[in-house]
Amino acid sequence: MSYELSWEIEGRVAINTLYGEVTAADVHDLRHAARDLSKESSWPIHTLVDLSGITKYQTNIALMKTAIDFKSEPTTIGWTLIYGAQNPLVRFMASLLTQMSTGLMHFRFFDTKEAALEWLIDEDITLRRHYRHAAEAEEAATF
């Protein structure tokens, strides 16, 4: 699997984009990378997860649960917003694994990144200022 992990909003919203075949080892590596990224902020970190590029995935649920073990996660976990899971089986596996994440993860599914961000901005008022300024700058640039 290839994945990209970066900030959508520095120190507040991370974005994980997954591509290709997803194995338990890949998920384990991604969890550690996400944990390291979360140490960069004292705010709760919300995460956008793009599953649209997944072509194959591990179906051994016990193995995947071990790979995403959240017991040692920092307390700065915010919302996890999952989108792009058009394949019903990918969506089912993602839902099952997030529900098994020892209760530390709050998650929701969306069809698109835009819908996920719109919901998150409504949910976390501290993000509104960032997106309002970004929208104003984009609007000013079009004139």
Image (tube, grey):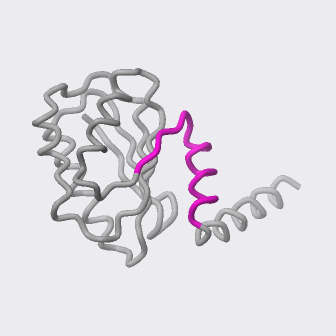
Which residue occupies the extreme right position in the image? 143
* Left or right side of 113 for 50: left
- 18 within the magenta span: no
* Left or right side of 36 for 18: right
Q: Which x, y percent locates residue 81?
A: 46, 47
Quadrant of the frame with the C terminus: bottom right
Q: Which x, y percent locates residue 60?
A: 13, 28
Span colored in magenta: 107-124
Question: Based on the displayed image, in which of its 4 quarters is residue 65 positioned?
Answer: top left
Whether residue 97 is situated above or below residue 40 in the rendered picture: above
Residue at coordinates 63% horizontally, 51% vertically from top-left? Answer: 118
Residue at coordinates 22% horizontally, 64% vertically from top-left? Answer: 73
Determine the main secondary structure of the stretch shown in magenta: helix
Whether residue 26 is situated above or below residue 121 in the rendered picture: above
Q: Which x, y percent locates residue 72?
A: 16, 64
* Left or right side of 113 for 118: right
Q: Which x, y percent locates residue 66?
A: 11, 45
Which residue occupies the extreme bottom position in the image? 42
How many labels, in total? 0
Q: Nearer the viewer, residue 127 or 142?
A: 127
Question: Based on the displayed image, in which of its 4 quarters is residue 71 positioned?
Answer: bottom left
- 117 within the magenta span: yes
Whether residue 30 is situated above or below residue 59 in the rendered picture: below
Residue at coordinates 41% horizontally, 49% vertically from top-left? Answer: 107
* Left or right side of 71 for 74: right
Quadrant of the frame with the N terminus: top left
Residue at coordinates 42% horizontally, 75% vertically from top-left? Answer: 43
